[in-house]
Amino acid sequence: MGGGGEGDQPKDYRLGYWTNSSRPRDIFYGIGEENVPARRYSLEGGKLMEKDVEDSRADPRSLDLESQRGLRTSATEFLQADVHSVTVRYGWTPWFLGDTYVVAWTVIAFVLTIAFIVVSFVKQAVRIGFPSLLSAPTTSQAFSPADFLYSFLPSLIGMILFLLWQPIDLYFRALQPFASLSDPGGAIAEQSLLVNYLGGLPFEVSIRAALAGHYKVAWISFVSIMSITLPILGGGIFTAQFVISKQDVRMAACMPAYYALVVFTIIYTLSFLVIWPTRSRYLPHDIRTLADLLSFVYQ
């Protein structure tokens, strides 16, 4: 089989079993050429680059990979050094779960929750009502600007909080097999490679993860479902009511539903304390594509 670009001599590639002079008993299968200088590689910017023969004439040994036992210039040695590097092994996690971001999310969540509770209960504004700042009576088209505003805004905030938790839930579901396999004692297939948390139904993932001992995944998945109550409750709590003592129309909350909203908000906020990914959930690279996943099992 010939090959090569313009001006190159035809190359005689052979498919078969090969040996080398240093290890004649080691046989490997592949495509190659006979009696040609071995290729040299170097690691530049995290990528494996082939070097020209012209660059290696200063060291005659560099032309033959079989004689480079004292040098770390072969492709295999570079790959091994790269894979076993701590920087590479624990080099990737989603940007929103980096150390700085997790601390920021946690601080922001706690500050906003404390402010929410203080504003709600210090002066009892939610219970006794507060001025609507908009027209409260219903128009002839059955539309109340005040009711719309105080239904839409809380529901919008709750929906944003619900959506913000979904990437966190997805990440921990997808990374659990890798976290299980990183255990020094290993893991059985049913608790690592065969778990199917990504395709589970609501609450099913939490139950299966809890039974398998993956409590962090179970809790985070539970919070992902529980957080849908935030836009539901937020959108139906406030209504325009006529307060006799004030002789005015004010926005007041249904207190049982409001207490439930406060409880779910506190649970949501406290859950940020458990989203810090441990080293077992750090990977060398992303896992969003099939090629990324296959790279973990190459030989």
Image (spheres, grey):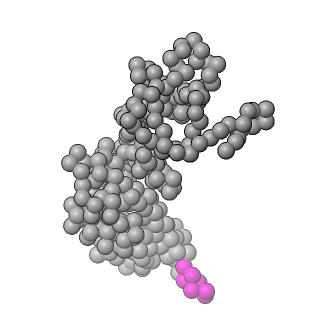
Answer with left or right where residue 157 lies relative to residue 10. left
Is residue 120 visible in the rendered structure shown here? Answer: no
Please name the residue shown 57% across and 39% down the image.
32
Answer with left or right where residue 280 lies relative to residue 100. left
Please name the residue shown 44% across and 73% down the image.
235
Residue 24 place in picture, x, y as percent:
41, 32
Q: Quadrant of residue 260?
A: bottom left
State which region is magenta.
Answer: 138-144
Which of the two residues, 237 or 290, is positioned nearer the viewer here?
A: 290
Residue 181 place in picture, x, y as percent:
29, 51
Which part of the image, by quadrant, shows the N terminus?
Answer: top right
Which of the two residues, 139 or 200, is positioned nearer the viewer here?
A: 200
Residue 39 in the magenta stretch? The answer is: no
Please name the residue shown 46% across and 63% down the image.
163
| Dominant SS in magenta | loop
Residue 254 place in picture, x, y as percent:
34, 76
Is residue 173 visible in the rendered structure shown here? Answer: yes
Residue 250 place in picture, x, y as percent:
43, 73
Please name the residue shown 32% across and 69% down the image.
205
Answer with left or right where residue 183 lies relative to residue 33. left
Most extreme residue toward the right is: 7
Vertical arrangement, residue 11 with respect to residue 186, above or below: above
